[in-house]
Image: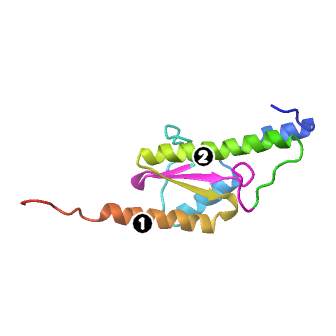
């Protein structure tokens, strides 16, 4: 762990919430307003998704632009630059691994950037939810004699 620039920077970074962030709460509010019901605390799933829509197996992650290297807004700190680059790239690699593990379990991982919240992010989640519900609702074709 590198030496922080000063104590206030260290305190600020330690205070960063991991759950119930403003973007996560805004997405939850928007999804609820659209009639989508979700669960929190899916700690048994890889990567501990922020929200899950269990009936259609959607695992939703609210990704911060800084921590997950958003292509539009990522900024690497000047202090301890090499350490931060390695740290943030490791976050992205971990995201890929947890997505792969979720996919193998039959779940669809969905990443919503904090800058796409609430409306564009909720649009993506709702569209996937509707698509998966339709697929699950289709009657299966019966093969063979009835």
User: What secondary structure is marked by label 1?
Assistant: helix
Q: How is the image coloured?
A: rainbow
Q: State which region is magenta.
A: 51-72
Q: How many marks?
A: 2
Depicted 59 relative to depicted 41: above or below: below
Which residue is tagged 1?
131
In the rendered image, the quadrant that contains the C terminus is: bottom left
Q: Residues within 10 Å of mark 2 (few under 14, many from 20)?
A: some
Q: Position of residue 133 (x, y in %)?
A: 38, 63
Q: Residue furthest left?
A: 145
User: What secondary structure is marked by label 2?
Assistant: helix
Residue at x 73%, y 45% (from the top left corner): 88
Which of these two is toward me, 25 or 18?
A: 18
In the rendered image, the quadrant that contains the N terminus is: top right
| Residue 49 forms part of the magenta stretch | no
Q: Residues within 10 Å of mark 1 (few under 14, many from 20)?
A: few
Residue at x 6%, y 60% (from the top left corner): 145
Left or right position of 3 against 127: right
Whether residue 18 is visible, yes or no, is no
Q: Residue furthest right?
A: 6
Which residue is tagged 2?
95
Residue at x 71%, y 53% (from the top left corner): 69
Q: Position of residue 81 (x, y in %)?
A: 85, 43
Left or right position of 16 against 118: right
């Amino acid at each position: 762990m590198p030496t922080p620039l000063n104590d206030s920077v260290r305190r600020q970074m330690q205070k960063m919430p991991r759950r119930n962030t403003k973007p996560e709460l805004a997405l939850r509010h928007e999804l609820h307003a659209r009639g989508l019901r979700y669960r929190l605390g899916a700690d048994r799933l890889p990567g501990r998704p922020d929200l899950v829509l269990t009936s259609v197996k959607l695992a939703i992650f609210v990704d911060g632009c800084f921590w997950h290297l958003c292509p539009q807004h990522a900024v690497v700190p000047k202090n301890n630059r090499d350490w931060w680059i390695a740290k943030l790239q490791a976050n992205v690699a971990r995201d890929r691994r947890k997505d792969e593990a979720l996919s193998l379990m039959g779940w669809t991982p969905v990443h919503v950037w904090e800058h796409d919240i609430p409306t564009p992010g909720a649009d993506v989640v709702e569209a996937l939810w509707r698509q998966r519900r339709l697929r699950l609702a289709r009657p299966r074709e019966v093969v063979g004699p009835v």
